[in-house]
Image (cartoon, rainbow, N blue to C red):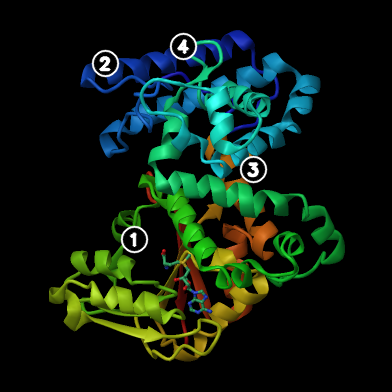
Amino acid sequence: MATPPGTGSVQLRPKLSELAATISANAKIVEDYLESKGLPYPSFAADGPSNFPIPQTPETEEIHDARQALLTASKHIYDLATGPNEYLRWLVWNYNDVSTLHVIVSFEIPKIVPLEGDISYAEIGEKCKVPELKIRQVLRLAMVNRLFYEPRHGYVAHTAASRLLREDPLMLNWVSYNTDDLAPASLKVVDALKQFPDSGETSDTAFALANNNESLFQFLGARPERAKRFGQAMSAFSTGQGYAVEHLVNGYNWGKLPKDATVVDVGGATGFVCVELAKAHSDFKFIVEDKVKAQLELGESTLDPALKPRFSYLVHDFFTEQPVKGADVYLIRWCMHNWSDKYAATMIKSLVPALKSGSKVIINELALPEPGKSNPWEERRIRTLDMVMMMCLNALEREEGDWKRLFAEADPRFKFESCTQPPGCLMNIVEATFVDE
Ligand SMILES: C[S@@+](CC[C@H](N)C(=O)[O-])C[C@H]1O[C@@H](n2cnc3c(N)ncnc32)[C@H](O)[C@@H]1O
């Protein structure tokens, strides 16, 4: 397979013809696979597949590498053919794309446009109580981004992307959460950096400045409907093969622990992660902790009765001393990136009085790659998430060195073991052992 220029190293001067050759070679690999398996062909037609139609399995790893090379090289050739001047002019105009999406979801246009056939701009305008011409202005820009199309002059029909906004509630929530709640905050980042340059508090953020000084948690706490949408938007982001719990179950050597190890899942929500671990390790015991009692109750009430003897649930605030002493593993998954270093350090320090020599602290989160060292597609995603964490919570995604530093500062008795990324997984497993001899 041709190596994609730009992957694994910053290449500022690739030749257009080399990029085109990479595109051609990798498109052929992907296309041949689709044909050989009789899979649907990628398309934005309304009946096209919603996801890229190749499942993510160990057998398809090479095909996904080819797809990645295709994405990387085609973005690169597009940028080069645009040129820096025009590129920059367009880059800053992206807010118009967000604005069209905002109009589309706020006026529920995906529901107004029929799944079969089409509808006139006039009729859409009538239903939205917005003048036809304004609706036309918005939708014709959206169409440039493959949201809806115009099958005949003056009429609108669905594409596969606009159909998703009608049929996939997680996607709809993802888009409306971002357009309603986050986009306004993005314009307050400069103010927050000027007013609170060193703060690690959730109240001193761009989000708070855009929302009457309410932190994201206060804002969601006071608005159950927004909180529900937030939860669904988060699922839309983190559902997917790359975030599957199975990577934690299979990607860490749990076998090196005592056969009847006790695992404490700190901030474990319903305990769904422990349920998967319990299936793979029949003698492990689990204590699921969370501050939100309702989450624990939901987990307990839906737990497979066969697992009940090995599970217990405990309301606990992870910024206070850990009440379960001497467990083999304290697992923290997807909790620390919500907090600045000040709070992340408190979270680790709060464990220390409970640890015995040999206790493991396992953190399952992202670890940022070195700039330009991973595939650019994934790098964009993870760096964007990092920016969102700052904007919303004064928090951050961390790189391996940050994880090491947090443990070293929390207690010198921590031995940092590793920061690994299981194949196909977008998250890392960070492991430290408490050594007190
Ligand atoms: C993003 S969720 C992660 C849940 C789960 N560990 C996972 O892997 O998906 C963060 C969890 O931390 C819990 N949480 C937030 N603040 C907490 C606190 N101070 N103490 C304990 N749990 C807390 C939330 O209720 C939520 O269940």
Q: Is mark 4 within 8 Å of ligand 1?
A: no
- Dot 3: what SS? loop
Which quadrant does the C terminus fall into? Answer: bottom left
What's the mark number on residue 252?
1
Give me the residue at 76% from left, 33% from top. Answer: 92
Nearer to the camera, 155 or 220: 155
- Identity, as a three-letter code, of the amino acid under mark 3: Pro
Between residues 240 and 328, which one lies in front from this camera angle? 240
How many angstroms separate mark 2 from mark 4 (CA)?
16 Å
Identify the element where label 4 is drawn: helix
Residue where numbered disc 3 is placed: 371
Q: Secondary structure at mark 2?
A: helix
Q: Earlier in the sequence, mark 1 or mark 3?
A: 1
User: On the rendered image, what quadrant is the N terminus found in?
Assistant: top left
Q: Quadrant of residue 207?
A: bottom right
Q: Which residue is mark 4?
A: 24
Q: Find the distance from the CA under tag 2 to the CA under tag 3.
A: 36 Å
